[in-house]
Image: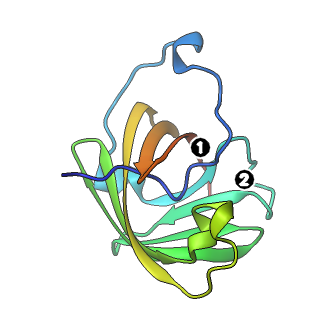
Amino acid sequence: MIRAGSILVAAALAASPCAQAAAPETSLTDTSLVGKWVVNIGECSDPNAEFITFLKSGAVESTRNGSADAVGFWRLENDRIYLNVLTTPARLHEKLKDVNGYYPFDITVATFNVTADSFQGVGVLDDQTRYGKFTRCKP
């Protein structure tokens, strides 16, 4: 059974993708995914935004407020990003804020509405379902 989820998708739901203008959809590739992406309504120039960085080596880092809060590895297969990350449980759910330590999590992000510089993703981690928009940050 594939577990789908996203540590990287913000809790706030965004507007329905059906309400947005249609853009030509493409598929992500290992090469096109590499780089730094800002999550949801954040700006690339805001150091306090939520970012995810996919490295060519297969490493991934999620940062918030300028600090790494999840690190691990990624692979891309059939428009799904598979993440194996190490993070605190509080990163995944506010109810777990008192749980100390770092734990491994396997997460899958199903991507859609993919363009050269953005994509959307839906994930489920256990009982959580979340939506997020990812926009590429230019170097």
**Alpha-carbon neighbours of circle 2 within 10 Å: few (<14), some, or many (≥20)?**
some
Vertical position of residue 103 compared to residue 105: above or below: below
Task: Report the residue marked by disc 1.
Answer: 135
State the residue at coordinates (66%, 42%): 40
State the residue at coordinates (63%, 69%): 96
Vertical position of residue 131 compared to residue 22: above or below: below
Q: Position of residue 23 (x, y in %)?
A: 48, 18
Dot 1 falls on a residue whose secondary structure is strand
> Which residue is more in the foreground, 10 or 34?
10
Question: Is 111 positioned to the left or the right of 94 in the image?
Answer: left
Within the image, what quadrant is residue 133 found in?
A: top right
User: Which residue occupies the extreme left position in the image?
Assistant: 1
Question: Is 71 positioned to the left or the right of 33 in the image?
Answer: right
Which kind of residue does numbered mark 2 sit on? Cys
Dot 2 falls on a residue whose secondary structure is loop
Question: Is 128 positioned to the left or the right of 107 in the image?
Answer: right
Task: Report the residue marked by disc 2.
Answer: 44
Q: Position of residue 58 (x, y in %)?
A: 34, 71
Question: How far apart are labels 2 and 1 at the CA level?
Answer: 8 Å
Question: Is 2 positioned to the left or the right of 15 in the image?
Answer: left
Q: Position of residue 39 (x, y in %)?
A: 63, 49
